[in-house]
Image (tube, rainbow, N blue to C red):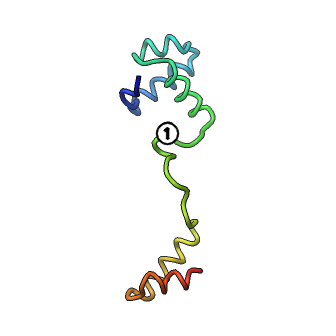
Amino acid sequence: MGKSRDLTDIEKGMIIGYRARDGSISETAAFIKCSCSPIVNVYNNWKDQEGAQSRRANCGAPRAINDRGECRLQRLVKSDRQATVDTVMAQMN
């Protein structure tokens, strides 16, 4: 059985509020009308203050350059807009 939908921000806030005032997981799930696993995930993410609450946010390949390298790349491209990819790559490396 697949995922039917993502929780809205309002529902996430309701979960956090209900669980913060000592509501049980099953009571919270009945109140929000969803299964127990998203209740646990949302509350644990809020409690631990870790990243996004959806798995869609952390998919894909890792970034090839960091923020500092991106600034350097922007400076190189702005300094010579007619440069080819090969010359910019040679200057970056």
Which quadrant is home to the C terminus? bottom right
Q: Residue furthest right?
A: 48
Q: Residue at x 56, y 67 (%)?
A: 65
Taking depth in this image into account, of 69 and 4 the one nearest to the observer is 4
Q: Position of residue 36 (x, y in %)?
A: 50, 18
Check disc 1 and report its element: helix, strand or loop: helix
Q: Residue at x 41, y 22 (%)?
A: 1
Q: Residue at x 49, y 51 (%)?
A: 60
Q: Residue at x 59, y 29 (%)?
A: 44
Residue 69: image quadrant is bottom right
Q: Position of residue 19 (x, y in %)?
A: 55, 20
Q: Is residue 23 above or below residue 4?
A: above
Q: Is residue 57 above or below residue 75?
A: above
Crowding at mark 1 (Cα within 10 Å: few <14, some 14-19, many 20+): few
Q: Position of residue 64 (x, y in %)?
A: 55, 65
As drawn, is 93 to the left or to the right of 15?
right
Taking depth in this image into account, of 70 and 88 the one nearest to the observer is 88
Residue 3: image quadrant is top left
Q: Is residue 81 above or below residue 9?
A: below
As drawn, is 70 to the left or to the right of 83?
right
Which residue has dot 1 on it?
Answer: 55
Q: Position of residue 14 (x, y in %)?
A: 45, 24
Kind of residue indicated by mark 1: Arg
